[in-house]
């Protein structure tokens, strides 16, 4: 196949094509399909050697159209493979032929014929069309229930390297790949594929003013008028008409790319599924925040309400660290929280340094939280037969219960941080009373926070005392003493200056 660059044709075969194409179609209608194809193949050789792209494209599409019209799909497949492999074949002509054959796929008499044509098209390397055909094949396998094969077929495409494919279409392909991997329970592959999408592509554009919209509308109308005039002038020139059509398609693709809201929502929904699967609560919260910053969500009260609830739930469930603490404070200041008052109350408890006993939290918020799809106070393992195989419903029920236990852990960890803030030393019995836990759980939660370096604590078991005072290094003590002495000497010097000043003022008053 020749390279894709355009070259000036040595001879124009437009008139020959105009004459022989109808003749070949008439021959095919009379039953002489082979004679019609041979007639066009003879002309195809001449147009190909003369680099007449427009005529070659018409002949290739004419040959496959004749095969399709007579219902000879085996011959069509044979001609597609033969024509694409001819020496010096023009790449643009092959691309046009493949596009025409793709349009015929819905007219195939049965699935086996359709699959055979698809496999033939996949052997021709025209990257965009091959990717689209592969997507059709993957959808067929998915409809047949063969998810693994559908995922393998679609994921073999590295569409991010296709320079001729529009960015929106690339993103759709990758999202389809991720969706198939998730359905196939291949979460690791789904996470890898999702990283191929740059979130900058989903960046929300600033709203345009009425004046900008009006000016844009006028410019578009002017452009369309000019295009119509140009189209009328070039109506009878097939080659230029084809180039014009390609330009129109590219322009249309660019227009579609302006609005990527549907892709943005689909991408973040997939990221939320991945984060939930890995119990990565902080990432889930971030993805929900990206999702809520979309006009489609902001303009839908029900979707906005649900998304705000999930943002609060997942930031509370996220383990404490500097990033989580900062994000929690920013979410707490969000004025939209008035739409979810009960969740806002729960969030506020985590922003103030006060104890919140778990029994009181469970009593006040438990019924509401367990009515959502995220939490469940009932342990599914105690309600089901352990010998039964794990189903998707059972796994989801287990995750809901785990989130309930994680919420309890976050409340207990908050209480330990509050105690560490106000106490230097505290008896273990008193700490158990404040946390409303037994000795084993108290030590377990305290040890977890110490290991994570969230708090500093040392337990003296024989004495039954917990110390939250961090020992200081000799250098730190000496530096603090040096700083205190410097401050003291500075104060003494200022006092001496003031005393001297008063003595001088008193002496002046006596002399007067």
Image (spheres, grey):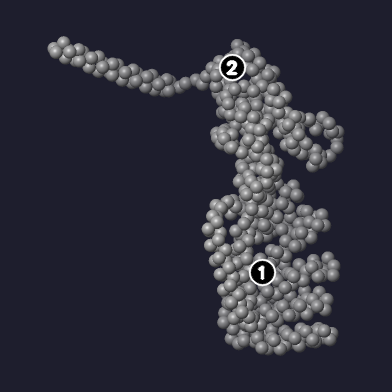
x and y percent of residue 467 in the render? Answer: 56, 17
> Which image quadrant: the C terminus?
top left
Q: From what the image shows, is residue 38 above or below residue 315? A: below
Marks 2 and 1, the one that precedes in the sequence: 1
Q: Residue at 22% of width from left, 17% of height from top?
A: 501
Secondary structure under the numbered disc 1 in the rendered image: loop
Q: Is residue 106 above or below residue 372?
A: below
- Residue nearer the viewer, 110 or 349: 349
* Residue at horizontal 77 percent and vertical 71 percent from the top: 104
Crowdedness near tag 2: few (<14), some (14–19) or many (≥20) residues, C-alpha within 10 Å: many
Task: Report helix, strand or loop for mark 2.
Answer: strand
Q: In which quarter of the view is residue 46 placed?
A: bottom right
Give residue 130's position: percent from left, percent from top: 69, 66
Q: Measuring from the top left, give residue 135's x and y in whole percent.
A: 72, 61
User: Which residue was labeled with disc 2?
Assistant: 466
**Neighbour class for label 1 at 10 Å: few (<14), some, many (≥20)?**
some
102 with respect to 284 (left or right): right
Q: Quadrant of the N terminus?
A: bottom right
In space, the residues marked 2 and 1 are separated at their CA atoms by: 71 Å
In the image, what residue occupies the spot 67% across and 72% down?
95
Q: Is residue 278 visible?
A: no
Q: Nearer the viewer, residue 367 or 63?
A: 367
The x and y percentages for residue 88 are 64, 79
Residue 217 seen in the current view: yes
Q: How many marks?
A: 2
Q: Residue at x 33, y 21 (%)?
A: 486
- Give the labeled residue for mark 1: 126
């Amino acid at each position: 196949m020749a390279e894709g660059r355009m070259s000036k044709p040595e001879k124009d075969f437009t008139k020959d094509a105009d004459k022989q194409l109808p003749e070949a179609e008439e021959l095919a209608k009379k039953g002489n399909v082979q004679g019609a194809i041979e007639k066009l193949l003879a002309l195809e050789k001449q147009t190909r050697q003369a680099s007449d792209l427009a005529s070659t494209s018409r002949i290739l599409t004419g040959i496959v159209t004749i095969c399709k019209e007579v219902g000879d799909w085996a011959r069509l497949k044979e001609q597609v493979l033969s024509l694409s492999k001819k020496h010096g074949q023009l790449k643009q002509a092959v691309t046009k032929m493949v596009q025409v054959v793709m349009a015929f796929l819905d007219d195939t008499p049965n699935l086996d014929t359709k699959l055979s044509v698809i496999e033939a098209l996949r052997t021709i390397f025209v990257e965009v069309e091959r990717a689209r055909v592969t997507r059709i094949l993957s959808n067929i396998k998915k409809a047949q229930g063969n998810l693994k094969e559908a995922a393998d077929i679609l994921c073999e495409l590295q569409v991010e390297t296709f320079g001729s494919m529009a960015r929106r279409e690339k993103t759709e392909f990758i999202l389809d790949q991720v969706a198939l991997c998730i359905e196939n329970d291949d979460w690791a592959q789904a996470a890898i594929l999702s990283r191929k999408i740059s979130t900058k592509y989903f960046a929300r554009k600033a709203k345009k003013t009425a004046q900008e919209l009006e000016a844009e509308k006028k410019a578009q109308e002017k452009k369309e008028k000019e295009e119509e005039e140009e189209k009328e002038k070039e109506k009878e020139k097939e080659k230029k008409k084809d180039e014009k059509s390609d330009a129109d398609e590219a322009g249309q693709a660019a227009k579609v790319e302006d609005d990527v809201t549907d892709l943005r929502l689909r991408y973040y929904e997939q990221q939320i599924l991945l984060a939930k699967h890995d119990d990565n609560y902080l990432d889930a919260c971030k993805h929900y925040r990206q999702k809520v910053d979309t006009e489609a969500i902001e303009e839908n009260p029900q979707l906005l309400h649900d998304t705000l609830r999930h943002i609060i739930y997942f930031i509370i469930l996220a383990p404490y660290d500097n990033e989580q603490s900062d994000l929690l404070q920013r979410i707490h200041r969000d004025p939209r929280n008035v739409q979810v008052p009960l969740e806002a109350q729960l969030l506020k408890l985590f922003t103030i340094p006060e104890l919140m006993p778990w029994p009181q939290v469970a009593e006040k918020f438990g019924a509401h939280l367990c009515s959502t799809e995220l939490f469940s106070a009932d342990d599914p393992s105690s309600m089901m037969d352990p010998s039964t195989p794990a189903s998707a419903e059972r796994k989801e029920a287990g995750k809901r219960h785990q989130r309930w236990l994680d919420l309890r852990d976050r409340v207990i960890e908050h209480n330990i941080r509050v105690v560490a803030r106000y106490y230097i030393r505290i008896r273990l019995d008193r700490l158990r009373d404040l946390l409303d836990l037994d000795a084993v759980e108290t030590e377990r939660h305290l040890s977890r926070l110490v290991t994570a370096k969230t708090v500093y604590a040392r337990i003296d078991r024989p004495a039954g005392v917990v110390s939250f005072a961090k020992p200081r290094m000799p250098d730190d003590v000496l530096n603090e003493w040096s700083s205190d002495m410097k401050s003291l000497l500075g104060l003494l010097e200022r006092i001496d200056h003031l005393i001297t000043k008063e003595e001088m003022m008193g002496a002046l008053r006596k002399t007067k």
